[in-house]
Amino acid sequence: MSTRRTFLTTALQASALALGGTAVTSQAQAPKRQLRKAIMGGTLGIKGTLIEKYTAAKEAGYEGVEPSGGMNQQEVIDALGASGLKAASVCCHTHWKQTLTHNDEKVRAEGLQGVLQTLKDAKAYGAESILVVPGVCNEEVPYHLAWERSIAEIKKAVPLAKELGVKISIENVWNNFILSPLEAVRYLDEVGDPIVGWHFDIGNVLRYGWPEQWITVLGKRINRIHVKEYSTKKMKDEGVWKGFDCDLTEGDNNWPAIMKALDDVGYTGWAISEQRGGVNPNGLKMLTERMDRIFAM
């Protein structure tokens, strides 16, 4: 781990020099990656109206934002227009409470309606993808039923997604479900339509795997990425949730390997931060600067 941190520190210093224009390196001369910075709306801790929050994100260097589904559509449209941000994705607002794997069929139906509404919101905002947590597996919901139910509900949303031209992107989260990239590929294959792909969360994987390996296996199935840091040291010393209590580049993501994996699979487009640091303009600026450094590795 110390070797990885040393390598990462060296890479950060080199990229910082390249960004500052004080050194000429082979990395600085490499073609710029086609990644567009966005931020998950729920991590914007700026006080004020939605327009003020989005404007602060724009001023910090973001190009896009990921609002939640189920918001007041006109308010979001106005905030996007006033700030100049684009909708990079829309996050489903019902998938944690009205899960697509719930034992109660009525609850699953409510969850499906949330997915459908999120698709409609995305179309209204000009977003081409929505983020969906596929369900939760627990003591009451066994794995095999979670699998069957989740796929059945997602398939019901496919016709609207195709009609609107908006992709459904499944996110890897801490839901005790779809715990490996091979499972993720099998899941998408069983859904059986290319309108359904993957929203890859980089930080969520380090608890039980390596992001670069997931990227290699998922390949072209990745529609969007969440840029997020995680510390396995804090996870071991302080608890699993404490692993997220670190700033970008200060955890255990092997960012050079992650960037190479993204290059190898040809990923371009939106890179959405879901990361602490968005509570004030200085924090937002820090996030965008660190994302620039990561993207230059």
Image (cartoon, rainbow, N blue to C red):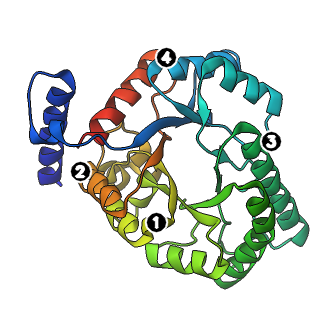
Numbered badge on residue 70? 3
Q: Nearer the viewer, mark 2 or mark 1?
A: 1
Which residue matches tag 4?
59
User: Are discs 1 and 3 less than 8 Å apart at CB?
Assistant: no
Residue situated in front as seen by the camera: 80 or 187:
80
In which quadrant of the rendered view does residue 96 lie?
bottom right
Numbered badge on residue 220? 1
Seen in the picture, residue 19 relative to 133 is either above or below; the reply is above
Find residue 147 and report its horizontal and vertical position in percent. 66, 79
In which quadrant of the rendered view does residue 78 lie?
top right
* Label located before the other in sequence (2 or 4): 4
Seen in the picture, residue 89 relative to 17 is either above or below; the reply is below
* Label located before the other in sequence (3 or 4): 4
Q: Circle 2 sits in a helix, a strand or a loop, which is it? A: helix
Residue situated in front as seen by the camera: 33 or 236:
33
**Amino acid on which disc 4 is placed:** Glu
Q: Circle 3 sits in a helix, a strand or a loop, which is it? A: loop
State whether residue 197 appears in this view: yes
Give the residue drawn at x 18%, y 55%: 1
